[in-house]
Image: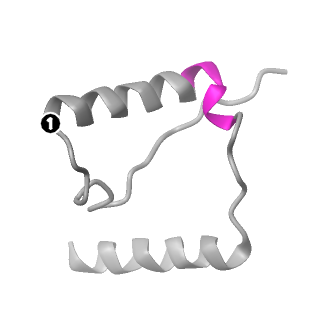
């Protein structure tokens, strides 16, 4: 059975501190998508713990409430 493809989701504002050109940012994002597609993104991945997952869920809820 094949594993489902990963879907990359970037949190709003996650690149606000990026110190580079828009082209460099686009290149980095494209590389992340390539890594997700071929599975190499998981090579050095670290699973989130329950507290980190809850924090992300809360941030998502706050973002949805503002919209």
Residue 14 is inside the magenta segment: no
Query: At which x and y percent is residue 56?
Result: 51, 71
Q: Residue furthest front?
A: 19
SS majority, magenta: helix
Q: Is residue 31 above or below residue 15?
A: above
Left or right placement of residue 9 versus residue 44 in this view? left
- Where in the figure is residue 11, as x and y percent of width and height? 37, 59
Residue lying at the far right in this picture: please name it: 1
Taking depth in this image into account, of 30 and 23 the one nearest to the observer is 23
- Quarter of the picture holding the N terminus: top right
Left or right: 58 as drawn, with respect to 48: left
Does residue 28 appear to the left or right of 24 in the view shown? right
Instruction: Specify the quadrant that holds the C terminus.
Output: bottom left
Quick one: SS at disc 1? helix
**Residue 38 percent coordinates (x, y):** 61, 19
Q: Tag count in the figure?
A: 1
Q: Nearer the viewer, residue 63 or 32?
A: 32
Residue under label 1, please give it: 22
Kindly identify the residue that appears in the image at 22 percent across and 59 percent down. 16
Magenta stretch containing residue 38, yes or no?
A: yes
Q: Position of residue 30 (x, y in %)?
A: 36, 26
Q: How is the image coloured?
A: one colour
Quadrant for residue 62, please give it. bottom left
Dot 1 surroundings within 10 Å: few (below 14), some, or many (20 or more)?
few
- Residue found at x 54% / y 78%: 55
38 vs 50, left or right, is left
Kindly identify the residue that appears in the image at 29 percent across and 26 percent down. Answer: 27
The residue positioned 42% from the left and 76% from the top of the image is 59
State which region is magenta: 37-42
């Amino acid at each position: 059975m094949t594993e489902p493809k990963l879907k990359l989701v970037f949190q709003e504002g996650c690149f606000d501190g990026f110190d580079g050109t828009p082209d460099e940012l686009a290149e980095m994002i494209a590389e992340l998508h390539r890594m997700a597609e071929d599975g190499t993104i998981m090579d050095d991945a670290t699973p989130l713990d329950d507290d980190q997952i809850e924090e992300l869920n809360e941030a998502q809820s706050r973002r949805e409430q503002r919209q």
